[in-house]
C-alpha cells in the first residue's frame, strides 16, 4: 500500500490493513513517515507502532507535499522502483494522486498491477 503521506494510511486504511493481515497477507506500507502530513507527531508515532505491531513492513519514501519538485519526484520514483524490484509485489494499492502517478511510473514494466483509490475529487473544480 502506498500513500504520499502517512496520515492517509492512519485516516483511511487501518481497517483495510487489518483485513489483509487477518487474511494472512504479507503487507508493506510505503509512505512519508518522516514528513507525515496533517496529523501530529504523537499520532504519527502511534501509527508506526500500530503498524509494526500488526506485522506490517514499513518503507520510508520521501514524497514531497502536493505536486512536489521534479528532482524529489525523480528520487521518489527511484525509491519506489527499487522497492518494487526487491519485493516483487503481487499488487500495489495506492491512496494519493501523486503517489499513484509516481507508483505507476515506477512499476512500469514490472507486471505488477497498481490500483488507485481516490479519496475525494482532487481534480474537480466547482
Image (tube, grey):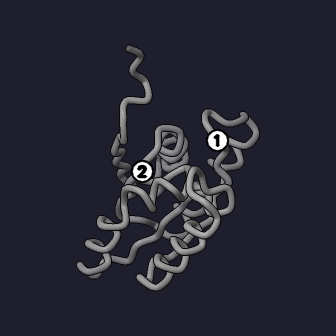
Q: Residue furthest top?
A: 126
Vertical placement of 54 versus 28: above or below? below
User: In which quarter of the view is residue 11 placed?
Assistant: bottom left
Determine which quarter of the picture holds residue 69.
top right
Comparing 94 with 13, the one in front is 13
Looking at the image, which residue is at 38% across and 14% down?
126
- Chain-order first, disc 2 or disc 1: 1
Image location (x, y in percent) of residue 88: 46, 67
Q: Which residue is mark 1?
A: 65
* Element carrying mark 2: strand
Question: In the rendered view, would you say 122 is above or below 17?
Answer: above
The x, y position of residue 35, in whole percent, is 67, 56
Q: Which residue corresponds to mark 2?
A: 94
Q: Residue at the location (57% across, 63% down)?
A: 83
Callout 2 crowding tier (Cα within 10 Å): few <14, some 14–19, many ≥20: many
State which quarter of the image contains the N terminus: bottom left
Q: Secondary structure at mark 1?
A: loop
Is 60 on the left-hand or right-hand side of 15?
A: right
Report how many numbered discs are placed on residues in the image.
2
Q: CA distance from mark 2 to mark 1?
A: 16 Å
Give neighbour class at mark 1: few <14, some 14-19, many 20+ (Cα, 10 Å).
some
User: Is mark 2 in CB contact (under 8 Å) with mark 1?
Assistant: no
Depth order, front residue of 78/46: 46
Amino acid at each position: 500500500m502506498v500513500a504520499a503521506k502517512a496520515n492517509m494510511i492512519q485516516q483511511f486504511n487501518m481497517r483495510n490493513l487489518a483485513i489483509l493481515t487477518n487474511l494472512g497477507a504479507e503487507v508493506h506500507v510505503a509512505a512519508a513517515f518522516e514528513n507525515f502530513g496533517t496529523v501530529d507527531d504523537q499520532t504519527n508515532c502511534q501509527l508506526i507502532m500500530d503498524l509494526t505491531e500488526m506485522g506490517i513492513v514499513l518503507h520510508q519514501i520521501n514524497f514531497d507535499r502536493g505536486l512536489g519538485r521534479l528532482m524529489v519526484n525523480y528520487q521518489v520514483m527511484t525509491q519506489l522502483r527499487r522497492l518494487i524490484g526487491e519485493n516483487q509485489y503481487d499488487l500495489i494499492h495506492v491512496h494519493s494522486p501523486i503517489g499513484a502517478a509516481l507508483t505507476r511510473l515506477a512499476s512500469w514494466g514490472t507486471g505488477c498491477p497498481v490500483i488507485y483509490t481516490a479519496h475525494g475529487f482532487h481534480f474537480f473544480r466547482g
